[in-house]
Image (cartoon, rainbow, N blue to C red):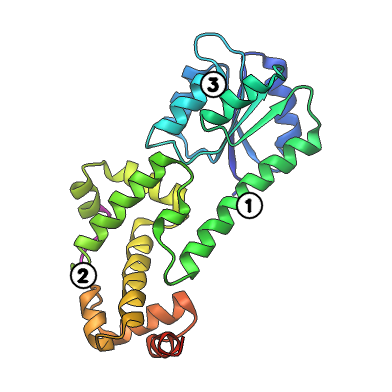
């Protein structure tokens, strides 16, 4: 599936122009103002927003501020397009959390490069988190709002780690979120399902315990909520490309 991009502008010709530039590489949704854009974001798993700054009712600055301060949407990169080329306007956009600020008229190549860079960067951050035993979940946060959410998620999983049956239903109930909101937020931030994220969190906690060298492997397997040591060892090797024993030895020799 192509990444889903939302275009926001009150001028139809601009929306059509942007769509022509982007529709061979991305799936495009369109909105003609900020309020309409927020409704689209509530309904669809948008991966990036490109918005004009000058719009009636809710301008691009206000839209960006709302996106970046709303837990459901704060992870979504925002590119602001504007004819205002003053330093003050740029600073305002970036202070509100915009990920890029592009002045009109802009080149097609510049816009495509900026989109590609933002999406690629997020993918690299996710992959590094998933493949590195001791990298904290907060590393995938892009905003303060994301960071607070991930801290809360990490604490909740950690407190309930010995529950073999911990799943998205239980997690959502403890965090007082709807199951669908929690699922979408975890998927958008990590590109993992909640069950995959819980599993990786168990394995990362196990890596910490293995590195400390104070427990036997079968004890650690039990402490992080795996039903058997063999299941734990298989999962650990698949995630980090080494067995728990190899990992423990590598830490004892550093």
Q: Could you say which quadrant of the image residue 39 lies in?
A: top left
Q: Residue placed at 48% from the left, 40% from the top?
A: 45
Q: Earlier in the sequence, mark 2 or mark 1?
A: 1
The image shows a total of numbered marks equal to: 3
Q: Is residue 216 above or below residue 147?
A: below
Q: Residue placed at 31% from the left, 87% from the top?
A: 230
Which label is found at residue 61? Answer: 3
Q: Residue 167 magenta-drawn?
A: yes
Point out residue 158 in the picture as x, y percentages from the top left corner. 25, 62
Is disc 1 in contact with disc 3, using a CB cutoff of under 8 Å?
no
Other residues around mark 1 within 10 Å, as few (<14) / some (14–19) / many (≥20) = few
- How many angstroms separate mark 3 from mark 2 (CA)? 45 Å
Disc 1 target residue: 120
Q: Earlier in the sequence, mark 3 or mark 2?
A: 3
Point out residue 157 in the picture as x, y percentages from the top left corner. 26, 59
Most common SS among magenta residues: loop
Disc 2 target residue: 164
Q: Which type of secondary structure does the marked residue at label 1 adopt?
A: helix
Q: Which type of secondary structure does the marked residue at label 3 adopt?
A: helix
């Amino acid at each position: 599936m192509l990444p889903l991009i939302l275009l926001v502008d009150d001028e139809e010709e601009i929306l059509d122009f942007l769509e022509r530039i982007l529709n061979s590489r991305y799936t495009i949704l369109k909105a003609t103002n900020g309020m309409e854009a927020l409704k689209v974001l509530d309904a669809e798993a948008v991966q990036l927003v490109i918005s004009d700054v000058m719009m009636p009712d809710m301008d691009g600055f206000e839209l960006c501020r709302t996106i970046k301060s709303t837990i459901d949407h704060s992870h979504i990169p925002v590119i602001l397009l504007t004819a205002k080329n003053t330093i003050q306007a740029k600073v305002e956009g970036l202070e509100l959390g915009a990920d890029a600020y592009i002045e009109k008229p802009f080149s097609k190549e510049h816009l495509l490069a900026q989109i590609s860079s933002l999406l690629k960067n997020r993918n690299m951050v996710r992959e590094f988190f998933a493949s590195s035993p001791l990298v904290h979940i907060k590393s995938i946060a892009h905003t303060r709002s994301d960071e607070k959410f991930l801290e809360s998620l990490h604490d909740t999983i950690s407190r309930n780690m010995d529950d073999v049956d911990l799943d998205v239903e239980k997690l959502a109930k403890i965090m007082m979120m709807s199951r669908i909101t929690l699922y979408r937020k975890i998927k958008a931030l990590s590109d993992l399902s909640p069950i995959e994220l819980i599993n990786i969190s168990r394995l990362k906690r196990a890596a910490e315990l293995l590195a400390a060298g104070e427990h036997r492997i079968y004890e650690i397997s039990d402490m992080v909520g795996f039903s058997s040591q063999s299941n734990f060892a298989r999962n650990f090797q698949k995630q980090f490309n080494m067995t728990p024993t190899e990992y423990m030895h590598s830490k004892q020799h550093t």
